[in-house]
Image (cartoon, helix red, strand yellow):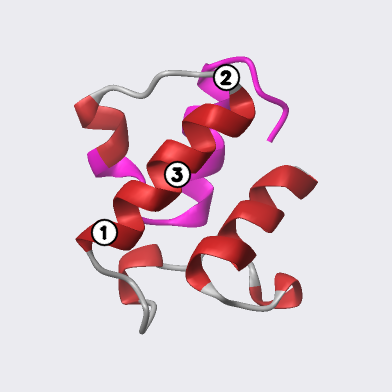
Amino acid sequence: MEPRLVDILTDVFRIRGDAVRDDMQLDGLEIWDSLKQMEFVLTVERVFAIQLSPQEIFAMRRVDEVRRILRSKGVDA
């Protein structure tokens, strides 16, 4: 998994790096709320120099979906 993605997930959602799994539900995390989701999205866009559509943002509920979207943008996630 892309180390920068793991760093973003651990920083924004305050989880351990070894806890990040493809099947992890982001909206199931205790700290998750709409503000954390936006912080995550904005950080992903900045770090990877991409722009996400509203549909892509809505789909980013699981780590595997985040990785799929990043790959579609040319990021080796």
Q: CA distance from mark 3 to mark 1?
A: 19 Å
Q: Which residue is mark 1?
A: 35
As shown in the figure, which amino acid type bears the numbered disc 2?
A: Ala
> Which numbered disc flags the more N-terminal residue, 3 or 2?
2
Q: Say which element carries label 1.
A: helix
Q: Nearer the viewer, residue 74 or 22?
A: 74
Residue located beneath label 3 in the image: 65
Quadrant location of the C terminus? top right
Q: Position of residue 16 (x, y in %)?
A: 69, 78
Dot in front, 3 or 1: 1
Q: Quadrant of residue 15?
A: bottom right
Q: Earlier in the sequence, mark 1 or mark 2?
A: 1
Q: Would residue 7 be seen by someone viewing this image from the given angle?
A: yes
Q: Residue at x 61, y 26 (%)?
A: 48
Q: Is residue 16 above or below residue 52?
A: below
Residue 27 spot, x, y in % from top left: 31, 67
Asked if disc 1 and disc 2 are in contact, CB closer than 8 Å, the reply is: no
- Taking 61 as reference, is 66 left or right? right
The kind of secondary structure the magenta stretch mainly shows is helix
Q: Which residues are magenta?
A: 58-77
Q: Which residue is mark 2?
A: 49
Mark 2, Cα crowd under 10 Å, few <14 / some 14-19 / many 20+, is few
Q: Residue at x 40, y 65 (%)?
A: 26
